[in-house]
Amino acid sequence: MTRISTYAANQSALMDLMKAQKQMFEAQQQLTTGKLVHDLKGVGYQAEMLSAARAAETQAKSYEEAATRTETRLAAQDTALEHIADAANSLRLAITTKEGDYIMQQTREAFYEVTNALNTQHAGTYLFSGTRADVPSVGISDLSELVPMGNADEAFQNNDRKPQVQLDQNYSIEVGMLASDVGGDVMASFKRIADFDAGPNGPFASPLSAAQEAFLQTEIQNVVSALDNLHARVGENGTRQAHVENLKTNHVERQDFITLMISDIEDADMAEAATRFQQAQTAVQVSAATFSSLNQVSLLNYLR
């Protein structure tokens, strides 16, 4: 074998060895990471599509998380509304009785339940205070505090702006209710009862006077009306819950679709990668043996 032909053979064997090593390294990387490539350059013309898909996946995930937080808030809101409605119903039942002491005892308990529910906090903010979430929705804690007020609205501290959450690219939803809207009617009933009890025809006693019975007969209708309003608020909140749940499902399904699309672009076929790794490993061994053999022949030629 001449020196030129030996050199050419060595170069060819070296190139084969380097090629086999590269193929083995790439297959090993795919087996380790599960990815075909490690940067956008590796996907060529699909780089723009992959980048857009990843951005869409991130956006869908963000909206899904916002929907999850909103679901939690609406669930807390639903619980509070149910408590307010239950308290208003207890008030309705109380003022149908003839026992004055019992009426005022139940009215105070219902007032406590309503104000406590209206001052419900979620994630560190007051649910029914509008965007003024750092103050309690109701600023009083005792039924008697309603008496000197000009009207029941003075008991509320919420502003008139309802919190909103964006749950899709071009869609946002009101997630908050205002204490003055939710509890305004029942708070007005509390004030009328407290005013009457503290007025010239009070306090309520057993048996009730004719004036007291007449007042309570009228007030029953007001409480029923307040209760109807509360039931409407519960239904409104439930509708929002269902809507948010549907939006969340859509975002999850969108993520699943995008994930499959991204997978088609960048994920490796693990069985295929394992086969290529084994083939490349065999090729490395063969190329290395060939290169070593040729080097030994070349060295003997020089020694001669």
Image (cartoon, rainbow, N blue to C red):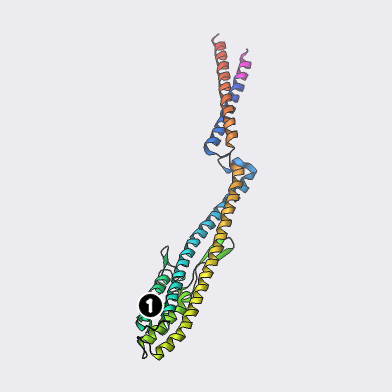
Check residue 3 for magenta coloring: yes
Q: Residues within 10 Å of mark 1 (few under 14, many from 20)?
A: some
Please tell me which residue lies in front, 134 or 2: 134
User: In the image, is 155 to the left or to the right of 26?
Assistant: left
- Residue situated in front as seen by the camera: 12 or 40: 40
In the rendered view, tell whether residue 134 sits above or below residue 150. above
The location of residue 100, given as percent across then percent down, is 36, 83
Task: Please determine whether, in this image, residue 247 is positioned above or below residue 278.
Answer: below
Q: Is residue 269 left or right of residue 217?
A: right
**Which residue is located at x 59 percent, y 27 percent?**
279
**Measured from the top left, where is residue 138 in percent x and y?**
40, 74
Determine which residue is flagged by label 1: 106
Residue placed furthest toward the top? 304
Q: Is residue 56 visible?
A: no
- 153 lies above or below 281: below
Q: Give the extent of the magenta segment.
A: 2-9
Quadrant of image for the C terminus: top right
Residue 230 or residue 65, whichever sits in front: 230
Which image quadrant for residue 187? Answer: bottom left
Mark 1: which secondary structure? helix
Across and down, in percent, residue 126 comes to 42, 68
Of 223 and 44, the residue lying toward us = 223
Q: Looking at the magenta stretch, what is its main secondary structure?
A: helix
* Visible residue check, residue 222: yes
- Identify the image quadrant of the N terminus: top right
